[in-house]
Amino acid sequence: MAGNPALKNVHAQLKARMEKTVDDFRANLLSTRTGRANVHMLDQVKVDYYGTDTPISQVAQISTPEPQMILVSPWEIAIVPAVEKAIRTSNLGFNPMHDGKVIRVPVPPMTEERRKETVKHLAGVLEDHKTAIRNIRRDGNDQVKKAAKDKLISADDEKRASEEVQQLTDAEIRRVDELFKAKEKEIMTV
């Protein structure tokens, strides 16, 4: 398909869109809570910064000095209470404490039930991303059929291109499955 001038652009677009979907899934996995502290756990937290909801990473430095602790150092001391409130109300189950300059966020160990809930939630996210990859495949197949209908490619080229689209789809779905299995193992390990 990449060798056929009529379909070269289609192949590049499909690959790029599928890569973006896999990267989005990887970002979801990074922000998922496991038993250990991770700076990406706070990626979804937004702070009210002078009337604008701003990602916490843009108003503070986030680090993990210990395996069970996240340390948040806001750039401005004046917003320490706002950052603490944003973390507390983020529904992540954290209970932050501050000393006026930095915010300490202890990461409690996950219960077995919470681990199972997290894996179940990730399985749903995995299905959403697989569906997105399949939708991209459908778009690619539609473009191939349109090229064949417009007589830009032969019937053999259409068949070959459809097979390549399917192979690309299978490879990307395998990648997200492997990422999910690795994260599931990490979450379920006590």
Image (cartoon, helix red, strand yellow):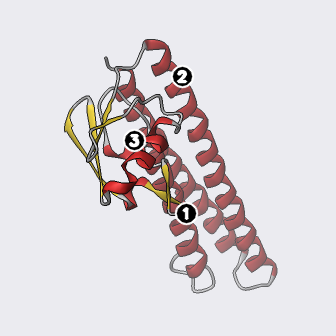
Q: Which residue is mark 3?
A: 41
At numbered mark 2, what does the secondary structure look like: helix, strand or loop? Answer: helix
**At label 3, which amino acid type do we have?**
Met
Q: Which is more N-terminal, label 2 or label 3?
A: 3
Secondary element at tag 3:
helix
Decide which of tag 1 and tag 3 comes sooner along the chain. 3
Q: Could you tell me how far apart the alpha carbons at marks 3 and 2 are, in whole angstroms?
A: 16 Å
Residue 11: give x, y in percent of width and height. Answer: 56, 72
Q: Amino acid at mark 1?
A: Thr
Q: Which mark is residue 117?
A: 2
Q: Which image quarter: residue 150?
A: bottom right
View extreme (left): residue = 65
SS type, badge 1: strand
* Residue at 69% across, 71% down: 158
Q: Residue at x 62, y 68 (%)?
A: 161
Which circle's residue, 2 or 1, is located before the other in the chain?
1
| Residue 43 place in picture, x, y as percent | 43, 49
Name which residue type carries label 2: Glu
Q: Is residue 135 above or below residue 115?
A: below
The residue beneath circle 1 is 52
**Dots 3, 2 in contact, CB < 8 A:** no
